Amino acid sequence: MWIKRLLKRIADPVDGWLLLFVLLISALSVVTVYSASNQNPDKVVGKMITVIVSLSIMWIVANLKPSQLMMLAPPMYVTGLLLLIAVAAFGVSTNGAKRWLNIGITKIQPSELMKLAVPMLLAWYFERHEANLRFRHFVIAAILILVPAALVQKQPDLGTAVLIAAAGFYVLFLAGLSWRVMVGLFVAAAASAPFVWTHMRDYQRQRILTALDPMQDPLGKGYHIIQSTIAIGSGGPLGKGWLHGTQTRLDFIPESTTDFIFAVFGEEFGLWGNLLLSILYICVIGRGLMITNQASTQFGRLLAGALTLSFFTYAFVNMGMVSGILPVVGVPLPLVSYGGTATLSILIGFGMLMAIHRDKKLMKK
Amino acid sequence: MSRTILRDHHGERYNFQLRLLVALVCVVLGFMVLIGRFFYLQVMQHEKYHTLAESNRISLVPIPPPRGYIYDRNGVVLARNQSEYTLEITPSKLEHSLEDTINALSQYVEITTKDRRRFKTLMDESKDFESLPIKVRLTDEEVARFAAQAFRFTGVEIKARPFRYYPMGESASHLVGYIGRINDDDLDKLDDEGLLPNYKGTDHMGKFGLEQSYEEVLHGKTGYEEVEIDSNGHAINSLKRTPPVAGSNLILSIDIKLQQIAEQAFGTNRGALVAMDPTTGEVLALVSRPGFDPNLFVDGIDAQSWKELNDSTDRPLNDRAIQGTYAPGSTFKPFMALGALEIGKRTPQWGMSDPGFFQLGNHRWNDDAKGGHGWVDMRRSIVASCDVYYYQLANDMGIDNISNFMAPFGFGQKSGIDLPGEKTGVLPSQEWKRRTFRKNPAAGKWVAGDTVSIGIGQGFNTYTPLQMAQAVSILAADGIVHRPHLVRYIEDPATSARTPVAPAPIGRIALKQANIDIVKDAMVGVNKEGTGAAAFRGAEYVSAGKTGTAQVYSVKNGKKDIIGKVHNALTDNAWFIAFAPADKPRIALALIVENGGWGASAAAPIARQVLDYYMVGKVPGQPTPAPSSTPTPDASDEDTDPASAPSPDPAQAQ
């Protein structure tokens, strides 16, 4: 039967487990977006369209061979880098911050592309030098990470710069960066903190100060943290129930459908809800690490590992920020926050994981 | 061999898996930290947060500060706030479609198509959950009618809001500017500057003119109130109040009466005028005609009115005084003369017989007077506005001498006035032409002919009326340079304490007083016996002036098709510069009438009205023997009066 064949063709590149977890998290997201947007059906439809479109693109990526991903890595990185330079030169400046590039039809944010391109390029680089890996390769790799990260930091967008650097670092780590060097870097980072502090932008410094003492800025970001903490805490073990979060209803939670959606979730579904979401995230990450472990090439291992750990970083940073233990940086809650670009880039990443996994299955056959 | 590779491979594999395990441990630890935090917040501290959220919901309500007022130098209000009722819709809270709601509302409150269009524009710029005005300035009756039906309209409410009001309407619109609703771009900008918290609860900010350039001063500091609210979100109790700090008032140097007299003197003509106090740099009047009503912008201008203003061939939104750049024509001659004296290229006595043209190579530049002006020395060259004298002079001085002498007067440079969007203009030099024609080095070479035209203020040079006024002001003040400014004082509304703005001069151009006196005397001659005499006949004070009539090659910044539509777009621009009283100047001005024709007939009478009011308090059209308020009779007078004015000076640069 052709229908059967078609279904088989569609199902073939997809990793069932990963898809299942993604769908479950997306379902939680739709429910939460509805509540967070004051029951705006448009937002629900918008979120669903985002998920469907992103899943379709994920499927297309999942059909690629890892060798094709490898071939894509250098051009993607170079394009991203050129776009970042273009942003620095001609970006749409909103007096102080240049993040967007106006390409006529729409504005694009090249830093988002870099979150994928950096780990891809580094995985490609280490695959090429797998046989004769030297320390200098790590130094070159570090430069490949720091150039785009520095450009993004200049925009200024510290949050994204850190995430790009983290994605690159995961590749270095998995590729075997010596433990001693890592300890050394850690010590150096701690020692240079005062220097970095003096070179940060005022608003970045303010965000860190605000995280330490939210009352310093009660009308600005501090207010966000105070209110989101109250929302989560007042949710209690069981939550106030869907659509019954008073903090949400009364507009206490800013950016409630995007960066602070976790406050809505925590208020309405309580500790048990948070545990459920955490477990789903752990399942996604666990599955990602399994795929990483089973990957047949160095490129596949490094890329899969870096993408999975990046996903963890997004979840950890967002939940940490909303619950008041990390400074406010503009990182959405992966797969849950409303907003197309972030969901799309995560699901493209998952498409790559599936592509790497499928390649291994093919090899087995 | 193969064994070692295999073992190596296994070793690497083991190393990789070890690292993966470490990563997994980190992930698990990370989630343990998070879950620990959730446990702390949601179980251990739950009571506390429950109390905070439930029984004692504290809402921080921002209290926007009242915006500072703008006054003229005599205390006349140019911008103030008044409280008005508005009918507002929060689109995301509506039960029915927006269209149905507005239709239903129109049964009780008159909603015009203009209101609808404006609301649509607002919606495009705003987020769904913001409360947006569908109708502003409701009458008491409308408020009552809606209040009786309010229960039927979820998501629609009446609010009392302070509105910015510009009582002078079109008058001084370009300099006062206007405020408008804060849009997404403004929000991004405020966010990047870290000013967003200070704009909580504020919907408007300065978008144009002084309202924009003094935004920080006028806005003030947002206060906030901690209020207890019930489960419906209504405030039931105020806990703590941090009052806002009101925005500061601006006391301008503008004399609004003088401003209005100048505006009216332009009639329906396009143009600009800048009058300054040469002893302080204070701007007394800054006119750009036509004007516009800034009140249109306050509640969000509707698309059609915007289109009309924006597409009008008269470009009323353009502040010609600081953004229009024009060739100065013969008003440039006094500065050329001063330059020649200063660098020793001319003495006052040096004279020439004007044959009616100037010849350089194969090119011939004609004078406006057929057959020439006869014997012309420096004084006569200014009084009669002789072109040939200045063709010759410019050629003798050379472009770089001219350019170097003129730069300190502010020609072709931003004056630094406290208004946004000032244009630079062009003070040409060899270097400038090379840069401008970089792609075509042959065209970028300065040729002697270029210099000849500059002598009579034609050719490449273009200046703003403000730059001209600044230059006249510097000449009137014998070389002392002030930064032109519109704000005299910033006033704290609570204490009425006034902080003066930029009172000190910023420099002095080293000039010989004797040379200045020669030029000034010639300019007095212009208004006594020269091209300005007709306009200044019978004046009760001694003034100095200079007419200018500048050819228009094309309408700068305008589109080609617009040129075709404006019937007189190729008529000359009429200029006049003046200061008074001649011995101890208190006012210096420059004005241009776009496509007005001769400076003597179109521009000088406007200057007369302005100076009459400022010097002796004469108001045109009032019983005191004021000069005719319509410039035309004066002009024809002058044309037929060979004794007083030999001829006006249409520039003849080729």
Image (tube, rainbow, N blue to C red):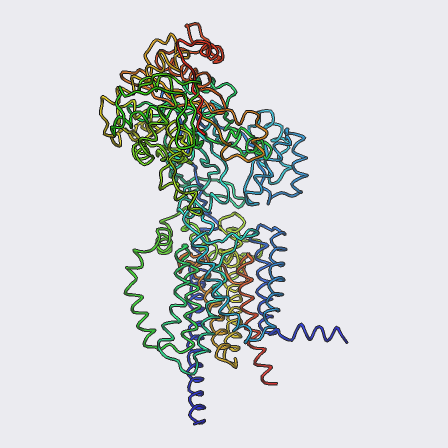
Image coordinates of residue B108 in percent, x first then y, are 65, 29
Residue B338 sits in which quadrant?
Answer: top left
Most foreground residue, A202 or B408: B408
Most foreground residue, B343 or B191: B343
- Number of numbered tags placed on the structure image: 0
- Quarter placement of the N terminus of chain B: bottom left
B503 left or right, relative to B374 = left
Residue A11 sits in which quadrant?
Answer: bottom right
Answer yes or no: is residue B77 visible. no
Answer yes or no: is residue B197 visible. yes
- Quarter placement of the C terminus of chain B: top left
Whether residue B237 is situated above or below residue A104 in the rendered picture: above
B88 left or right, relative to A198 = right
Whether residue B2 is situated above or below residue B471 in the rendered picture: below
**Residue at (75% x, 73% y) in the render:** A3
Whether residue B20 is situated above or below residue B580 in the rendered picture: below
Whether residue A71 is situated above or below residue B547 in the rendered picture: below
Most foreground residue, B84 or B60: B84
Image coordinates of residue A7 in percent, x first then y, are 70, 73
Image coordinates of residue A49 in percent, x first then y, are 63, 58
Image coordinates of residue A64 in percent, x first then y, are 59, 73
The single residue placed furthest to the right in the displayed view is: A1
